[in-house]
Image (tube, helix red, strand yellow):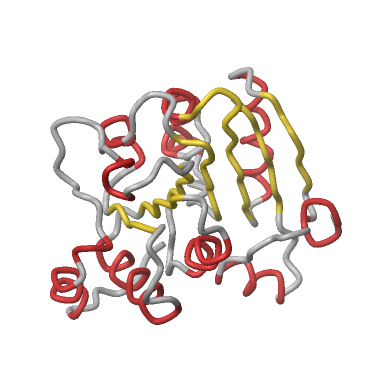
Amino acid sequence: MRLRNKPWTESFLKENQWWLLPVIVKEPLNLEKIYANKNPIHLEIGCGKGGFITNLASQNKNINFVAMEKETTVIGVAVKKSLTTNPDLKNLRFLNSYAEKLEEYFSTNSVERIYLNFSDPWPKSRHAKKRLTFTTFLNIYKNILVDGGEIHIKTDNDKLYEFTLEMVELNQWKLVSNTNDLYNDKNLLKNNIPTEYETKFHNLGKNINKIIIKK
């Protein structure tokens, strides 16, 4: 997600370090120590403005959430969103880094669920390897996910949806469920928490795709 640079974010994040996980690490994060419990870990890659992950963490206090975003400005906006929405939220932290580095931060078999919400579709064929559902990334996810761990994927981009289904089959993941019209699927829509982007495009009449796969 791209936002114009917001000069206030740098100082804001320094003042709110508690919400941030360390970016420079020598070994995977000790999440049990950071959260002071052994609750399951759920990870969102590309958290945008933070509305989805903040609402999800607020509704699921028995799960520890990590919101990952590569853009520092976006992280600043997301942290501010969380502080404004629920300043007492203790089960959510933010990580300002890249999906390529996930194995530096998370131990093998340590994450229960990954969320990929409206990831950049990288529409040009020559950029296929940058898509977050490309084989390289699926292998990274497979390493950090627990046995039976899931990935929940939502996108408004129909070509990325089709590409993802191809990658799922190619890389031998178990396809739990999928739809190319989330808002007409009562089962998958149940307990759905929309992102800001999702709400905007659904209101414009755009179909929303969802895929759930399992390790």
Check the image and name the residue furthest to the front.
37
State the quadrant of the C terminus: top right
Percent x, y of residue 145: 48, 29
- Residue drawn at (47%, 39%), measured in percent from left and top? 132
Q: Residue at position x 33%, y 66% from top?
A: 74
Residue 72 image point, x, y percent: 25, 62
Q: Is residue 116 above or below residue 52?
A: above
Determine the image quadrant of residue 174.
top right
* Residue 147 placement (x, y as % from top left): 55, 23
Q: How many marks?
A: 0
Q: Quadrant of the N terminus?
A: bottom left
The answer to whether residue 111 is left or right of residue 60 is: left
Residue plotted at (39% across, 51% down) = 66
Is residue 12 found left or right of 171 in the rendered image?
A: left
Q: Is residue 143 left or right of residue 118?
A: left
- Please state the horizontal and vertical placement of residue 26, each as a whole percent of the image: 13, 32
